[in-house]
Amino acid sequence: MAQVETLSPSVSANGAGGEEVLSIQQRRWRKFRSLKRGYYSLLILLGAYGVSFFLPLLVNNRALVVHYNGKTYFPAVRDLLDLPIVGQLAGTPFISGEELGQVGNKSECNYRALKRQYEQEGKGNYVIMPLYPFGPIEDISVEGNEPFMPPLSRTEFGELRLFGTDDRGRDVFARMAYGFQISFSFALLVATLSYLIGVPLGALMGYFGRWFDLLMQRFMEIWGSLPFLFLIIIVVSIVRPNFFVLVLMLVIFSWLGIAQQMRAQFYREKARDYTAAAISIGVPTPKILLKHILPNSLVPIITFFPFAIVGDIGALVSLDFLGFGLAPPTPSWGEMVSIGMDNLTNGYWWLVLVPLGALFVTLMLVVFIGEAIREAFDPKTFSRLR
Amino acid sequence: MVEYFIRRILLTIPTFLGSTFVVFLIVQLAPGGPLEQQIQALKRGGEAAGAGLVGEQALPKDAIEELKRFYGFDKPIWQRYLIWLGVMKREAKSYRIQPGVPRLVGEKERLVLVKEGDKYVLRNADDPAKPVGDWKWRREVDEETGQERYRVYREAFSGILTGDFGRSYRFRKPVLDLIAERLPVSIQFGIISFVLSYAISIYLGVQKALRHNTPFDFATSSAVFMTYSIPGWAIGAVLLVLLATDRFFPIFPLGGFEDPLYAEMNLWEKIWDRAYHFVLPTIAYTAGSFAVLTMLMKNSLLDTLSSDYIRTAFAKGIREQRVIWLHAMRNSIIPITANIGYVIGVFFAGSYLIERVFDIQGIGQLSFEALVARDYPIVFAFTVISVVITLIGSILSDLALAIVDPRIRFK
């Protein structure tokens, strides 16, 4: 924290003797990078999220490559395109077992079994499985999937189950990994969309005030008092809740807080001298709003962004836990916990601790980033005398 | 000042009406409501009984009319809303009647519809001289068959403004009784976690301010933000697995609010049993609530500590503890009181998520299950309660602020 002093404006402004002069954004970025915990959290989180887009190639029950009688197939690759809506994975066209030489299997090919089969036959056909050969949705109906396998146990064919299986024989590690992709995409999307709605509306309310502000405030008061859960329950009873319906539902409530924040900021900045000066020299209103006031009002909501993400991840997990989130069999942390809570007395601890552990770690990383951003944007120094 | 608060109170009225009306509208127009559920249930029953009729035919039109009347769906929505509010009369009692045949209404009273001249008149069946009070009658004509029917009814103002929250569809009990049953649990958790969160955040905030930028400060900041970001029920679930299941350390009970044998215990055992069952849920309830307060307390104390009068106090040689707790705290505590008005919410504290994790039959469970089952009277009651708490809470907070800080002038 000692870096606050070296990076404070007076020092860099005085740095005429060859020291570079930094813009405020550059100074913030340097400050952020100097806060190791937040910076590394950001790297880890971005890295994990980036990797999560390639999950179908890393954690999947579909093979990466199948070579059968001179033909080559890439079953896992098509899953790549499906990722943001993993719920629909189940509906993707698949290659049947018969097509690849699994006699009598008209449904989807079991690639793990196929691999063993090819190795036994020794005809030069081969299967390359992903690093972790279990998918998030395949359940007990697939050979070798037993319910409630404990973590680190092995299937009868010797494959490792890192975090065991759940009540339907689905792999907990695979579901956790895909759950991260879904939770984080969800939170990013909700936070971004609610910023896109909340920032302009709040800005207009704060700047123009009068009847527009008064009306909007009453509207927001009423809107905010609506029972959110009840609306979700009604929507869920009408349409099947997919990823985007849930995003929409959350956005229509979460923009309120951001609009309030922006309104207060614009209201305050409007009264400042520089705004009055801009108005008096005839700067057009849109330019005043965008170029003069907006940059000065963004700090509080930028520093709030990580915490908005945290809130949205928590909201999705809670909804899934209640059973009003993403439709099954979408892998989601909340649904995993609710299975675990239903089986609490049986000692299947991993069903609760694995998804919640993933949740805690994710939230922790985001919180560390948030702390660092706040520190970088708003380095408060207190002088204490005694 | 008084004017300001009067205006604030008056402004709550349109907001209250607006939000309750919107909720009312959504709830009543939402598909799958109690009427449809009931009709579906009756249809299924009819088919199961082998009535041989399928679809709408299985239910006589009469029965549907009767159901509509029971759920109040026979009127336009704005009338329903006014009736629900209690500013429009509703048919409190309503009976079918056939001209000339006495009908028992209420406990003993029997009414009869008699033809006098070419008009029908309602009379007391046992004593024609006795007045019939506020009983009225009307004629209904069946649109299809053209048959005439008669009905006696009595009207009354009865809605939330008169304190009538209606009866639950599922439990067939007054909503207020149902809520009252669950209140003790909620109040206990509400008060304990309220007191705890304020006590923790004031103490922790002060310590963090005094040790600003020390390892203690950084460590507690992270811990506080973590508890803030993780949903309380998730913390509860992890604690439950670690500290209540046989797999790890079975120290606490697996859930519930009290021991099954609670009623037979003596006072000390009861207190012990309560405390024993309360530990984990209380942590879950309190966990997320003190983060904001702690940071507020810390920053506000830091601000105060750098002001001139504190420097003067130190310069005079007053002991540090005294300066902090007596001089600085008076001004630093002000931001903490900004939200204290919401203390009235402790009476209805209860999160269904936490109650589900710990298997507690609380107020959250009641409202959640009412939502799922479309038990509208309960849903409305909770909507009213939460709107009122929010509105009054914010006024009370302002009032508290004005009392604590004489510099604040609302206008």
Image: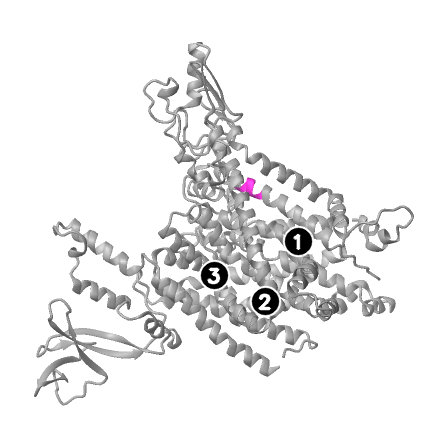
Measured in 3D between alpha carbons, the distance from the residue under mark 3 to the one under mark 1, in whole angstroms, is: 35 Å
What's the coloring here? one colour
Residue B404: x %, y % from top left: 66, 74
Q: How crowded is mark 1: few (under 14 residues within 10 Å), some or many (20 or more)?
A: many
**Chain bearing mark 1:** A
Label 2 marks which chain's residue?
A
Q: How far across and how far down the image is residue B224, in percent?
A: 64, 52
Instruction: Indicate the quadrant where residue B307 lies.
Output: bottom right
Residue placed under numbered mark 2 in the picture: A205
Q: Residue at x 25, y 58 (%)?
A: B38
- Disc 2 is placed on an element classified as helix
- Label 3 is found on which chain of the structure? B
**Disc 3 marks which residue?**
B186
Q: Do labels 3 and 1 share a chain?
A: no
Q: Is mark 3 on a helix, strand or loop?
A: helix
The alpha-carbon separation of the residues under discs 1 and 2 comes to: 21 Å
Q: In which quarter of the image is the C terminus of chain B?
A: bottom right
Q: Please give left or right for residue B107 compared with residue A338 in the image.
A: left
Quick one: quadrant of the N terminus of chain B? bottom right
Q: Nearer the viewer, residue A66 or A283?
A: A283
Residue B226 in magenta stretch: no
Question: Mark 3: which amino acid?
Answer: Ser
Disc on the earlier residue, 1 or 2: 2
- Residue under label 1: A303
Magenta segment's dominant SS is helix
How far apart are the alpha carbons under marks 2 and 3? 38 Å
- Occupied quadrant, residue B405: bottom right
Kind of residue at disc 2: Met
On the same chain: label 1 and label 2?
Answer: yes
